[in-house]
Amino acid sequence: MGCVNGKCCGRYPQSSDGDSRDYRESGPYNVQGIHVLTQRSLESIPVPSHNFHLEYSVHTQRGYYPDSPDKENQDNLCIRTQIQGNPNIHFFGVFDGHGQFGAQCSNFVKDRLVEILANDPSFSDDPVKAFNSAFLTTNYELHKSDIEDSMSGTTAITVLVVGDTLFVANVGDSRAVIAVQEGNRIRAEDLSNDQTPFRKDEYERVKQCGARVLSVDQVEGFKDPNIQSWGNEESQGGDPPRLWVQNGMYPGTAFTRSVGDSTAEKIGVVAVPEVLMVQLTANHLFFVVASDGVFEFLSSQAVVNMVASYTDPRDACAAIARESYKIWMEHENRTDDITIIIVHIKDGPSATNIRPMRFNRGTSEVSFTSGSELYHSVRSDFSDLHPCQHVVSTNRSPAIIVPSPKHEWPSEQ
């Protein structure tokens, strides 16, 4: 769910700090012109400090746009292993571009964010501060680049694995979710909280920054603009609340944070990430990082159920992409771009490896719990930022940012 008028997987350069993978999109997927990865690779990387390894696969495909058959995939993904040469630190990210130059924006952010993060002097002592700085610096560099980002930009959902700890930084409405084993049940636990006007805290923040928040029907006069209630994303996903300048019908973003989008930035669409820290345990089986091409119609629990139904993450990626595409076409005459990273946690903190499980479609919904001692929100000092870049603290969001203790880095082994 991006701009009202509206993702490309590029080549990742080799780095002395670690290994990057080359994921390129090419070749027909079916007669409707979807393009997917030509190589369905299965990769494995060790985390020697805690004696486990990560097994992962990815999938990205261009959306089906009957009115724009040549529109490129604006999604991008990045996997960087062994950050700073440390075998215990790995990065996974999905970037969902939007607007006329969304592909260029997501490609730029995919490359620069991880480089800036890895080279931050505070990276080892305070990864949350480093994440915050990396997002804001990347945003600044994008504004100063040759890419026209006044009405284009990208969301970013990223997971940094540091030993047995995950740091999840999110800007926008893509999502990360982790699978938690509870007896014979596998429960989805969101690692990010979609940043949209459906969230009361985000709604209030952008209103304070001067945004009008209206659905398309409201801004075009078909519905009462004074009714500032839109239900939830499940019921009102077809005409969600969007952000508009006071005296114009633009930019129309359905998200409240992004990288780029310099016009929307003036009304509160900022690049400040929400960061969640998670300590892995034996009950954590796998995590999924995906664009909203997946989560627009599939719940977090439905995605976790599908992954749990396959032993091989390559098969799970393909199944989720098929189901996402199918549901898009049931609701609309097009689909969004679809990008998925699935990472299985093997043999370490997750002593019980994943076994295939079958679920009925009718049981795909779940109530998510919050407040677990294993899930900590973390925060850097935002005092130097513009007031519209400050996070509004409420009790609603599980990823509201709080002061971060110094993190003990796993040693290089």
Image: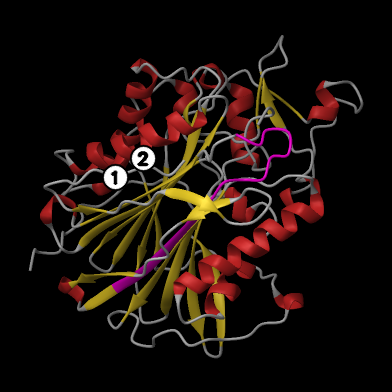
User: Closest to the observer: 337 or 223?
Assistant: 337
Q: Is residue 381 visible?
A: yes
Residue at the spot x=67%, y=53% of the render? 31
Residue 374 in the figure: left or right of residue 197: left
User: Closest to the observer: 132 or 236?
Assistant: 236
Residue 327 in the figure: left or right of residue 385: right
- Front label number (1 vs 2): 1
350 w.r.t. 387: above or below: below
Residue 330 in the figure: left or right of residue 38: right
Residue at the spot x=26%, y=58% of the render? 90
Q: Position of residue 160 (x, y in %)?
A: 31, 55
Q: Position of residue 150 (x, y in %)?
A: 51, 17
Residue at the spot x=42%, y=77% of the render? 285
Q: Is residue 368 visible?
A: no
- Residue 59 in magenta stretch: yes
Looking at the image, what colour scheme do you see? secondary structure
Determine whether label 1 and label 2 are within 8 Å by CB: yes
354 w.r.t. 294: above or below: below
Looking at the figure, which quarter contains the C terminus? bottom left
Amino acid at the residue labelled 1: Tyr
- The region drawn magenta spans 54-70
Residue 217 occupies quadrant: top right
Q: Please give the label number shown on residue 110.
A: 2
183 w.r.t. 75: above or below: below
- Residue 178 in magenta stretch: no
- Numbered-mark total: 2
Amino acid at the residue labelled 2: Lys
- SS for tag 2? helix
Q: Position of residue 224 (x, y in %)?
A: 90, 26
Residue 75 in the figure: left or right of residue 213: left
- SS for tag 1? loop
Q: Which residue is mark 1?
A: 12
